[in-house]
Image (cartoon, rainbow, N blue to C red):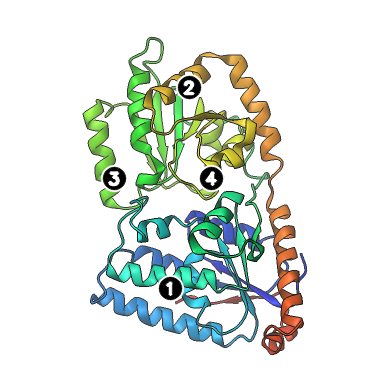
Amino acid sequence: MKSTSVVFIVTEGRRSMDIYSRKLAEHLDVPKLYTDIYEKAARKFGISFLSLEAFKVFFYDLKFLLKLRDHNTIFHFPNQHLGRYAHLLGKPYIITVHDIIRYFDLKGYGPYIQKPNFRDKVYLKLDYRGVKKATKIIAVSNTTKQDIVKHLGVPESSVAVVYEGVDHDLFRPVEHRLMSHPYVLFVGSEQPRKNLKALLKAFAILKRRSGLGRLKLVKVGSPGNEAFRRETLKVIKELGLVEDVVFTGYIAEEDLPVYYSGALCFVLPSLYEGFGLPVLEAMACGCPVIVSEIPSLVEVADNAALKVNPVDEVEIADTIHEVATNSELREELIARGFSRAKMFSWEKAAHETSKVYSEVERLVEAGVGEELVAEHRDLNAEAVSYNT
């Protein structure tokens, strides 16, 4: 995908928004600036403004901002938490917004993740100020677009929807199996919005039913923080599921297809998602999918998944039981899932992103910061590396 006046920032890390930037970068033929600044910032959520760590982060931030200011170009920031740098540049930029979950926590609607402290609030306000001031916003779903428009007061015309993709070379059915017992799969963190507690309660109901005694719940992914894991373990103990829940910890992306392919079904009972990429990954691997009936997951899954009320543990248990005992339903969900997943690719995402680049270029060439792209016209598509 060719563009002549945009630099795409690639965040190095293993979080979902890092995966987005890395996968998209592989299919965008534009100069790229690699950085680990987001990884460093994300690890410091919750620290005190007066701590040594906070001072270190401030200098990382300053160094990164000065690096950006060296480039007289249009930057595409790959997630909303880079808005804190973007709006200080004084030049046109593009920013991708995956969700506004932290905004909801900032406003006290949650916590969907965790309650922000004073320092967090300052940074989050800068993030969303950066989103509002973007020349163009890319939202990863129509649901996220509507959230941006409704809660941040951004005009609809300023937001383009570009869906995330699936790496179909990687996410496909595989024959290898890691476990001999049947299992229900959950992939994600243990943040409150992920609603793992409801799934655990549903699983406890399910285990009491005849014929499913061997069933396990496999939880893939890091907890998010130690407090989340402590709460999860507390619930597991209270429900008597200590021997029935398997924690894998972080799993490298290339190993995930094995877990998806071997699962009885994949369940994502989230209370809030901006997109829900694991839904498509599971479908691409031939795994039946159950999701909560929230707007973003309904949008992404369409008719290829079963929908449940995320706060009704009995309904979740009944739906898993139906998938476990009805082979025809399983085959139908698998077929629909394959068809749905094929509609999403990183090639398509890059193509649609390039259209946004062209639109912003036209705006700049029409006089909105025309002088800002002069330097970049001499750049080629080679990567620039920046690590703090």
The residue that disc 1 covers is 126
Is mark 1 in CB contact (under 8 Å) with mark 3? no
Image quadrant occupied by the N terminus: bottom right
Counting residues from the N terminus, which is met first, the one under dot 4 or under dot 1?
Answer: 1
Q: Secondary structure at mark 4?
A: loop
Is mark 2 in CB contact (under 8 Å) with mark 1? no
Q: Nearer the viewer, residue 255 or 130?
A: 130
Task: Look at the picture and state if 338 lies above or below 314.
Answer: below
Q: Disc 2 to disc 1, how far (Cα)?
A: 42 Å
Residue drawn at (57%, 28%), measured in percent from left and top?
A: 288
Which three-letter amino acid code belongs to the residue tagged 1?
Answer: Leu
Residue 359: x and y in percent read: 74, 70
The residue that disc 2 covers is 319
Q: Dot 1: within a 10 Å radius of its alpha carbon, few (fewer than 14), some, or many (20 or more) residues?
A: many
Left or right? Give the position of 210 relative to 10. left
The residue that disc 3 covers is 229
Name the front one of labels 3 and 2.
2
Which three-letter amino acid code belongs to the residue tagged 2?
Answer: Thr
Q: Disc 4 to disc 2, how far (Cα)?
A: 20 Å
Image quadrant occupied by the C terminus: bottom left
- Regarding residue 36, the answer to whether it shows in the image is no
Q: Image quadrant of residue 333?
A: top right
Left or right? Give the position of 10 relative to 185. right
Q: Disc 3 to disc 2, how far (Cα)?
A: 26 Å
The residue that disc 4 covers is 276
Q: Image quadrant of residue 304?
A: top right
Q: Disc 1 to disc 3, how far (Cα)?
A: 29 Å
Counting residues from the N terminus, which is met first, the one under dot 1 or under dot 3?
Answer: 1
